[in-house]
Amino acid sequence: ALKDQALGRKTTRFVSFPDRRSLVSLLKLAGPMFFVLIGKTMGYSAMTIRTGYFGMVSLACHNVLMRIFFFYCTFGDGLSHAAQTFLPGLLYRKSLQQDKVTEVKYASKTATSQPSGESSITGHDKNARTFLKRLLLLSFVVGCVNSNTARFIANHAGRAFTNDASLVSLMSHVSPLMGLALLIHPVTMTLEGSIIAGRDLQFLVGTYVASIAVLMVKLKFFCFDFAAVWKALVLFQLVRIFQFGGRVWRRTASSKMQLRKTAGAESSGNSG
């Protein structure tokens, strides 16, 4: 290493640690995501524990249905990752352009025309909304496909998992609830990914606190048979999709309102 330094060569450490600022920035993102993953694990584990109260057949059926459910959940997770990958770039470019416009306004306070950068902000915001709309449409299509194929497997391919007639019959009986949960899941995960992309992590944690609380209460006090366990999962999905959807809709509506104000200011400035 000393020889490389003497020759002016750059060396890379085998093990390096982040500085304090980078570590704090990482923890601000990783901390809430860790809580979200723990919350999901607790919820799914509580479903399995509650199912155990209804006998071995119900527990075996639950395990088979959960394997099918988790297989199709990977499609929703992929859509969430797509939102987390592409939306931050659009939002970051919009933020940079806003900073640039602010600097231009401060530099030329006497200018009567609108800074040209504001049209770029409008373009970035519109691109982000368009991308999210297309991703939500795709997630709805994926949800429909996942729901129907998963129900088909549970109804017509139960013999591939077991030869027990009572278990196969129970799988077919509960399959509509599994299909409904899978129909909602991709849209829910896409909305969740957009919230993560916008770094709205405090709201995300609050949403999961409420969702897990609703799930636990349902399982503890209002779950009297095996089908009710999957009704609790559907309720969990509905609580999340309404909370995430409401948050995204409010933020989109506020963004549109700002764009309208900007357009109105531009038109009034041009007419003056």
Image: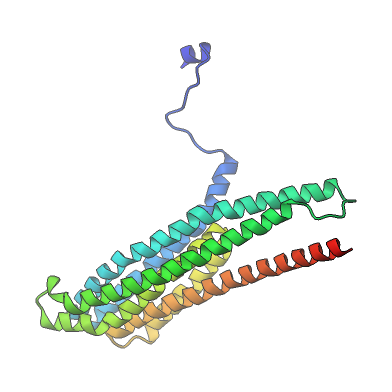
Which picture quadrant has residue 50? bottom left
**Quick one: quadrant of the C terminus?**
bottom right
| Extreme-front residue of the structure | 271
Horizontal side, residue 123 vs residue 44: left or right: right
Coordinates of residue 165 in the picture (x, y in percent): 11, 82
**Residue located 27% across and 78% down the image:** 51
Q: How is the image coloured?
A: rainbow
Camera-nearest residue between 28 and 181: 181
On screen, residue 251 versus residue 70, left or right, reads right
**Is any atom of residue 200 visible in this view?**
no
The answer to whether 67 is drawn above or below residue 124 in the figure is below
Which residue is located at x 34 percent, y 85 percent? 223
- Count the numbered circles shown: 0
Q: Is residue 173 left or right of residue 140?
A: left
Q: Nearer the viewer, residue 136 or 45?
A: 136
Q: Residue furthest left?
A: 163
Q: Position of residue 75 (x, y in %)?
A: 36, 63
Percent x, y for residue 57? 17, 79
Q: Quadrant of residue 218?
A: bottom left
Give coordinates of residue 267: x percent, y percent.
80, 65
Q: Is residue 23 above or below residue 220?
A: above
Considering depth in this image, is 128 or 163 the residue closer to the camera? 128
Residue 236 shows in the view = yes
